[in-house]
Amino acid sequence: MEERIQTALEKREVESAAEPTKDGALFVPRADIMEDREGLTLLMDLPGVSREGVSIELEKGELRVYGKVMEKTFPGDAIWTEYRVGDFSRTFAVAEGIDQSKVEAGLKNGVLRLRLPKSEALKPKRIEVKTG
Amino acid sequence: MVTFRVRDPFLPSASGELGRLRREMNGLFDSFLRGSSTAMGAGVFPPVNLYEEGDSFMLTAELPGLEKENINISVQGADLILSGERKPESDGPETSRHLHERQRGGFSRVLTLPVAVDAEKVTAEYRNGVLKVVLPKAEAAKPKKVTVA
């Protein structure tokens, strides 16, 4: 399924009815994906998620990321609300040719960074043309 | 750069009928923002929430991917300016982007609180990409109990 291009910056709620609704609203985190010769880099915004709250599963060509937000409510009366707080969930299809054993993840200031290295067979090879 | 001014038409009283009405009005405005991508305010970054508890306000903002040194908050009277820059990831050579959803670049928001706050006592913390600013109300803005002589 193609991702809908988001022009508004509002948070997008997970629409699938199959998704578990553990603690109320569940949101789709915004992501960037870059590809270079060596692999893919995936950046995902997970504000409010700590290292302990993030789970990443890579199985059968699917990369599933779940981010649990610990602090969902704040004291006092909400007198102005522009965003809602909830966990994050998103699944990506991962093309064949990613070396699953070498996937690395890091979380800093609410941004998850995943590095998915290409397996050797898929890296572009430079073929030298020999002059005879 | 996105600048957005929040003007709450109702002043202090958070309880009682006026408070309820105000919450309903905010609720209406919320669904208005969610319903349309062209509505004023739909493109604000970062999104903020404001809470009122007794003698102080707390502002929260989802602002992932910054260093705390690069978040600027200035307060004067009832106005709060939140600004900074979310630096783009530098692409190496031969890098192609497949998905590009995360906002980048400078931002600046001017927010007007319902009453003036004590700028000297404002504190802020940034953790896991969420900013929290605690804004104690200015002495002059606190409710006074008047004794009938």
Image: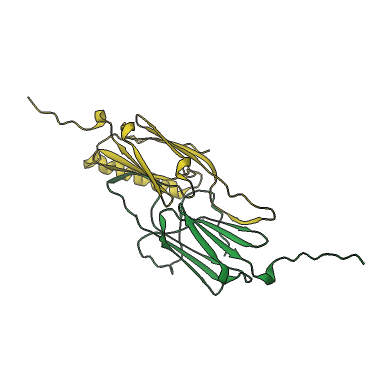
Chain colours: A green, B yellow
Location of residue B102 in the rendering, given as x and y in whole percent from the top left corner: 53, 51
Taking depth in this image into account, of B120 and B97 the one nearest to the observer is: B120
**B103 vs A6, nearest the viewer:** B103
Outermost top residue? B149
Whether residue A130 is visible to the viewer of this picture, yes or no, is yes
Q: Position of residue A80 (x, y in %)?
A: 35, 43
Choose top left, top right, bottom left or bottom right for residue B26.
top left
Q: Nearer the viewer, residue A64 or A106?
A: A106
Is residue B4 visible from the viewing direction of this image?
Answer: no
Instruction: Please indicate whether residue B88 sits to the left or right of residue A124 in the image.
Output: left
**In the image, residue B10 lies at what x, y percent?**
30, 35
Q: Is residue B7 above or below residue A18?
A: above
Q: What residue is shown at x 66% (from left), y 56% (from top)?
A: B96
Looking at the picture, how far across and down is residue A21, in whole percent? 38, 65
Instruction: Look at the image and tell me in which quarter the C terminus of chain B lies.
Output: top left
A53 vs B50: above or below:
below
* Displayed quadrant of residue A122: bottom right
Residue at 46 percent of width and 56 percent of height:
A46
Is B81 drawn above or below residue A53 in the view shown?
above
As drawn, the residue found furthest toward the bottom would be: A60
Number of numbered discs present? Answer: 0
Among all residues in the image, which is located at the extreme left? B149
The residue that appears at 25% across and 30% down in the rendered structure is: B139
Is B8 left or right of A1, judged from the image as shown?
left
